[in-house]
Amino acid sequence: MISIKKTYISLCFIFIINYTFAQTLSVKQYIDSFKNIAMREMIEYKVPASITLAQGLLESGSGNSRLAKNGNNHFGIKCKKDWTGCTILEDDDALQECFRCYSTAEESFRDHSRFLKENKRYSTLFTYSITDYKSWAGGLLAAGYATNQKYTDLLIACIERNKLAKFDTLIVNGYNPYNQEMPANFEIINAKRIPVTVVQPNQNLETIATQNNKTEKKLTKYNDLNYHRIEPGDVLYLKPKKNKATIASHTVAEGEDMWTISQKYAIKLNALYKKNLMIPGTEPVSGTVLQLQHKASTTPDTSRKTIQPSSMPTNSNLPLNGDNWHIVSAGETLFSISKRYGLTVDELKAINKLEGNQLYLGQKLRIKTEGKTTEEPIGIKHIVKTGDTLYSISKLYGVTIEAIKNLNNLKSDSLTIGQIIIVK
């Protein structure tokens, strides 16, 4: 029987982990690393990719557990009598229990699929719809996959919080995970034929702008990116959206937000809010009918509010809205941000009416007020990629590690993928 270590369960819900890819994986990095493997397993073994990814996140602590790091075991599968491969010992229900180990993480994902497909205990799961992750989550607990009685709720929450069901939808709609080209996350209803591009893995706003002969500022304005941080599969318009859609209304589905709906129908986000008498930043509950052409007669239920952007940052961390705003990236503090814009911490807190020092990833901070202009220091910037270290970056630009750390107020040598650092 497989059990979940509580220490690792909570990691599924942590969005900010300030270490490099090689040291500690964030939830987003884990999903980006294994989503194609999970989708391939869905095709071959009929296990929903959302279930596979959520179980991997929970069981391996986003790939950071000892079993995952030292044994490539992402699902906590124990040896059992029929296991003839390598093993790794770990304390669980008892001391030093035997767990399977693998040469690669992909082998672990394959063994997980076989474990479910070939075990009669889990045969009921395969009678459920391949997109019905809630039934799968309940069926796993009922079949004894985990000892934690909250396992079903944990899986469902992990899937919905991280929007993992979109990978099930991709496969059902014919996406081939063996290809490198990432399709759009949703169907585009763009009768006006406004040109678009789909964000690919390892792209950011800067590279997309360059490739399409646009500026980041224009793309930000065209796509309302002050409400959203781009991720692979997002649709970005290369020309302005319209003030109304070609369809009269839209019924909000589970997990949809206003930004996604505005992109789906090529309607400006502010226009969508105004037509539906909504306050910018609020989100309608599922089942709400939104007006896309004419003004609504009543305000919909907006009990669901946007607290932070719905995805991890993959684009350049540049101020938005005419340099009035700063978007918080991994590792940043009030001190580092205030230093960057020539403010004191107290001034930054006062401008944003902050009571404490806690920040969250993707948070918008105002960095300019009337009568006071703040400017980002001019310098050569580097966007951290997988495998980058302070040493490799220092060699690339011919500067010292200490100089980079001083310029960016770095307290350690840790970097985060997508982080922007000033190098000169």
Image (spheres, helix red, strand yellow):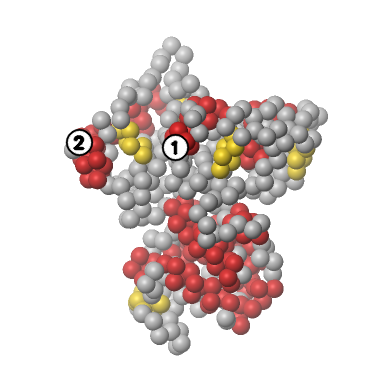
Q: Amino acid at mark 2?
A: Val
Q: Nearer the viewer, residue 155 or 190?
A: 190
Callout 1 secondary element = helix
Query: In the image, 296: left or right of 33?
Result: right
Neighbour tally class for label 1: few under 14, some 14-19, many 20 plus, Cα within 10 Å: some
Which residue is drawn at the image coordinates 33% and 27% (left, top)?
340
User: Do tag 2 and tag 1 residues touch (Cβ < 8 Å)?
Assistant: no
- The mark that comes first in sequence, 2 or 1, is 1
Which residue is drawn at the image coordinates 75% and 43% (left, top)?
251
Neighbour tally class for label 2: few under 14, some 14-19, many 20 plus, Cα within 10 Å: some
Q: Nearer the viewer, mark 2 or mark 1?
A: 1
Q: Nearer the viewer, residue 345 or 385?
A: 385
Query: In the image, 111: left or right of 19?
Result: right
Which x, y percent locates residue 168?
62, 59
Query: How many angstroms separate mark 2 from mark 1 (CA)?
Result: 24 Å
Residue linked to disc 2: 399
Asked which quadrant contains residue 273, the reply is top right
Callout 2 secondary element = loop
Q: Is residue 202 visible?
A: yes
Residue linked to disc 1: 207
Which x, y percent locates residue 291?
76, 34
Q: Amino acid at mark 1?
A: Thr
Which residue is drawn at the image coordinates 54% and 59% (left, top)?
177
Query: In the image, 55: left or right of 70?
Result: right
Q: Residue furthest right?
A: 297
Q: For the C terminus, give its image quadrant.
A: top left
Which x, y percent locates residue 417?
38, 46
Q: Nearer the viewer, residue 135 or 230?
A: 230
Query: In the image, 242: left or right of 164?
Result: right
Residue 126 - label: none
